[in-house]
Amino acid sequence: MSKKKYLKVLILIRKGYREHIGGDTIQVLKTAEYLRKFRVSVEIIESDEALSGRRYDILHFFNLGRPYDLYPYLSSIRSPLVISSLFVDYREYDVRGRFWPMRDIMAFVGRDNAEYLKASAKMLLGQLPYSAWQYLIDGHKKAIRKILQNADCLITATGSELERIYNYCNLLPAFTDVVPLGIDPIFFTKDTPWHRRKGIMSVGRIEGLKNQAKLIKAAGKLDAPLTLVGKPGKNSLLYNWYVHWLAGDRVTFAGHVRPEKLLDLYLEHRVHAQPSWFETTGLASLEAAASGCRIVVTNRGDTAEVFGVYALYCDPVNLLDITENLMLALETPPAAEQRDYFYENNSWEKSTKKLIEVYRRVLDK
């Protein structure tokens, strides 16, 4: 391994990650913050910036589901490549959750072509660099396979996510590891007694994948107050209009809020709900669990591995199932040991130490 005093890591993420905040934004910023605490030099660049002229020991790319962000760089990478996957399966949402006629189009073209069409549209709208043209030639699945073939290590947040990637690509790098997501310590600093809390909240971009429309309907059946935290997705204007049209006087739209304000909101609410069509980890639900909320989360994706017995699981298709789980969550406080469990298992400090071990192992190959 290099004898340099400081390990230098270059993080590559999608263009506009600060303006259009998602779970990947929080993961990247927290990863960089904690790496720096461990005396690792970190620079973050977006997918339209050049690699040339930058010195680094590791290139760490986030979001395997967006291969077009990394694809233009593959031929110029001269250092080990580490990938954090954040691998979402949009298939069920595309064919069952979208508005007509888009869901029928997505069902007709198939999963890989659906992702290809989405990427092509983003390029036409100027949301992707034209340097990603090679992706348009190779297609979605081939691009992901090529990235995995060039990767020195693939990191997932759960074992089920790693299995899902293998099932999709029939391919993994020689070195893989599972590094759980951490929770910002601020969410463990305060608590509010259960009897002082009320209502339901949900944190996430206002977009079809997050299924806020079904959540609004379910909360309405219970006549429970609902707070939605997050900005509309940049390509979700129609869905955002629909959600606002559905919302009544019992729904509050809080927009994007800073962690300190978000903690206050968690402490005010009994339940945090994410009835999404798919979740990998569900970072907002982790934060809410640390803040003492009862958790209702989708049964799709990797949530069962992350939350175990500390969540109620709902079917995103089934309004009655969502409603019944919300009702149960509103009436039953979380387990006494819930916060201790997540403090022990989802520490940014522990995750960062493991990540640095991954870096060193890659460099020692």
Image (cartoon, helix red, strand yellow):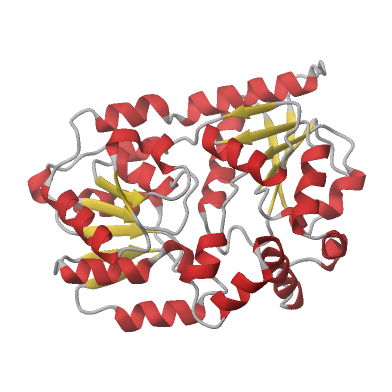
Do we see residue 134 in this rendering?
yes
Residue lying at 80% horizontally and 30% vertically, measured from the top left: 57
**Direction from residue 207 to residue 310 in the image, left or right:** left
Occupied quadrant, residue 327: bottom left
Vertical placement of residue 95 versus 75, above or below: below
Quadrant occupied by the C terminus: top right
Occupied quadrant, residue 37: top right
**Direction from residue 214 to residue 100 in the image, left or right:** right
Residue lying at 43% horizontally and 77% vertically, measured from the top left: 240
**Direction from residue 112 to residue 233 in the image, left or right:** left
Seen as rendered, the residue at the extreme front is 108
User: Residue 292, how many percent across, how many down?
Assistant: 24, 41
Residue lying at 37% horizontally and 60% vertically, measured from the top left: 316
Do we see residue 52 in this rendering?
no
Please give the count of numbered marks on the rendered protein: 0
Vertical placement of residue 259 versus 208, above or below: above
Q: Nearer the viewer, residue 56 or 200?
A: 200
Vertical placement of residue 81 versus 261, above or below: above
Seen as rendered, the residue at the extreme right is 75
Vertical placement of residue 181 versus 277, above or below: above
Residue lying at 36% horizontally and 47% vertically, measured from the top left: 285
Quadrant occupied by the N terminus: top right
User: Residue 273, how many percent across, how many down?
Assistant: 31, 55
Q: Nearer the viewer, residue 39 or 243?
A: 243
Occupied quadrant, residue 138: bottom right
Seen as rendered, the residue at the extreme left is 195
Q: Nearer the viewer, residue 325 or 223?
A: 325
**Direction from residue 249 to residue 27 in the image, left or right:** right
User: Residue 101, how many percent across, how many down?
Assistant: 55, 83
User: Residue 335, how many percent across, how many down?
Assistant: 19, 33
